[in-house]
Amino acid sequence: MKRVFAILVCSLFLNVGSASAQQTTAQKVADVASYGTWAAAIVVDVTQGPHTKGAYVTAGVRYGATALAVAAVKHYFPSKRPCAPACGVDNAYSNIPSGHVAFTVAAIDWNGQRGARHLGVQVALAAGTGAGRWLGFKHDWKGLVTGAIVGGLTGRIR
């Protein structure tokens, strides 16, 4: 549990600097919080699943496929972010899809093999991540929906 907490804290502090100077405090908080919910979804997925070599390899393939799909869509379909042109370290033309939402949706075990409580936590984390990205002016609804679609497709790798 200490490792999980350390991963979450590190992800939050490493990404505090990514907020633009023109963002309001509420936008910065939402942006940083979306990193926490994103990291928590990945940690919950990996730590609550079966602890076998095959399960870890499958999770790696799932998240690798998600990263490749997000990068490909962002490259071939550039779209202006709501925060453009002042998006800090984020690319101002990478609105579609939201990688954060794609990863949190890919972490969801839709088959319910881990129980309804686990499914509820994962769905809540995905919704929180989407809300954080939207409230932080990093994505509009199109970026969030396409991120959910990409994550839903790559999350089928189980």
Image (tube, rainbow, N blue to C red):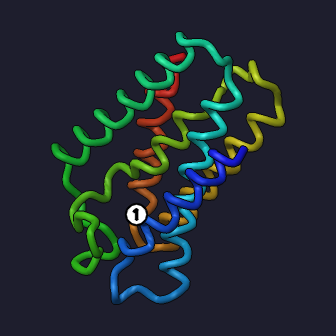
Image quarter of residue 20 = bottom left
Q: Point out the image quarter for the C terminus.
A: top right
Left or right: where 152 falls relative to 90 = right
Q: What residue type is labelled 1?
A: His
Residue plotted at (41% across, 21% down): 61
Compare residues 134 and 62 and report the one nearer the observer.
Answer: 62
Q: Point out the image quarter for the N terminus.
A: top right
**What residue sits right under mark 1 in the picture?**
139
Percent of width and height locating residue 135:
52, 73
Q: How many labels does the image show?
A: 1
**Relative height, residue 106 to residue 101 (above, below):** above
* Label 1 Cα neighbours within 10 Å, binned few <14 / some 14-19 / many ≥20: many
Residue plotted at (46% across, 89% down): 24
Image quarter of residue 129 = bottom right
Percent of width and height locating residue 137:
42, 73
**Relative height, residue 85 to residue 40 (above, below):** below
Left or right: where 82 falls relative to 34 = left
Element class at badge 1: loop
Percent of width and height locating residue 156:
52, 21
Left or right: where 88 falls relative to 113 = left
Compare residues 125 and 4 and report the one nearer the observer.
Answer: 4
